[in-house]
Amino acid sequence: GPLEEVSIPLYFGWFLLFSVKNKIKCTSMDFLKTLDTLDAFKKHSVDSEKEVDLEQYFKPAGILHCTTKFCDYGKAEGAKEYAENQAVIKSYGSISDLSLSAFFVTPRTCGARVYLTEEQLQLWPADAEKQAEPVPEAAASLPLGSRAHITLGCAEGVEPVQTGIDLLEILAQQESQQGELVEEMELGSLTYYGEGKWLLNLREPICVPACFSSIYG
Ligand code: ACK
């Protein structure tokens, strides 16, 4: 009936606890600031004459989270099955640590890569990587969980769904060793993947506690 339908949320995911939100925002701001000042960044910029202020360029994302399943209130493929999955029901409301392994920036989005544990992968839909629209070439063969990310910001007019697609594209390029190592930074190694795509692999992953839950609004 209609009640059953409304009980499926917009999406499920891990939501960063309030106490760590500022830490992630500050670290990602630091990353953007550093990137802004690099000569290599200016060189690869679309318009090398124009200064780009990345902190202004990206509009901050709303709720910091890592989407597991976008359900669209039940309209998305596999939404009901996911909501009824035993692992999902059992883990609902539980807190675990998310391991952030990289930050990335493209002309469209800015995000953090999330490295999932075996246990967290139980909550990861089997088709998450293949469902990306459009599917970046070679992304379908990437390991399960490759798309896991936190959207930190989007350029004007860009939807957050783009962040995971951008990450898949970068990882597919990483897989075929297309990147150009640009700089060893304090936080980790910075690689350029062409067309304004940057990824900073963190030397030390950042661990942040998050609650597995869902959003209806
Ligand atoms: O940044 P995100 O992971 O990208 O978090 C938001 C969240 O759901 C609410 O919009 C993600 N999202 C939106 N559409 C899709 C989709 N078709 N597939 C996967 N994730 C999606 C979006």
Image: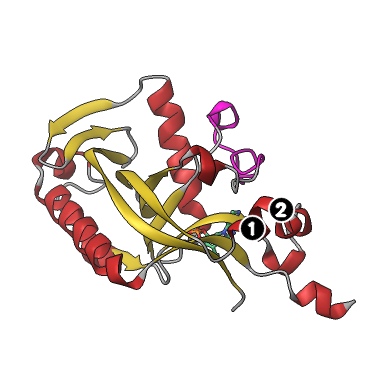
Residue at mark 2: C-beta within 8 A of ligand 1 = no
Task: Assign a secondary structure to mark 2.
Answer: helix
Residue 96 at x, y = what percent? 43, 55
Task: Inspect the magenta stretch and tell me whether residue 82 lies in it.
Answer: no
- Amino acid, disc 1: Lys
What secondary structure prevails in the magenta region? loop
Q: Is residue 70 visible?
A: no
Crowd band around label 2 with a 10 angstrom C-alpha radius: few (<14), some (14–19), many (20+): few
Left or right side of 99 for 75:
right
Give yes or no for contact between labels 2 and 1 (Cβ–Cβ under 8 Å): yes
Crowd band around label 1 with a 10 angstrom C-alpha radius: few (<14), some (14–19), many (20+): few
Q: Which residue is mark 1?
A: 90
Q: Which residue is mark 2?
A: 86
Quarter placement of the C terminus: bottom right
Residue 43 at x, y = what percent? 16, 39
Left or right side of 78 for 57:
left
For image coordinates 62% across by 75% down, the residue present is 216
- Range drawn in magenta: 126-143
For image coordinates 54% across by 66% down, the residue present is 93
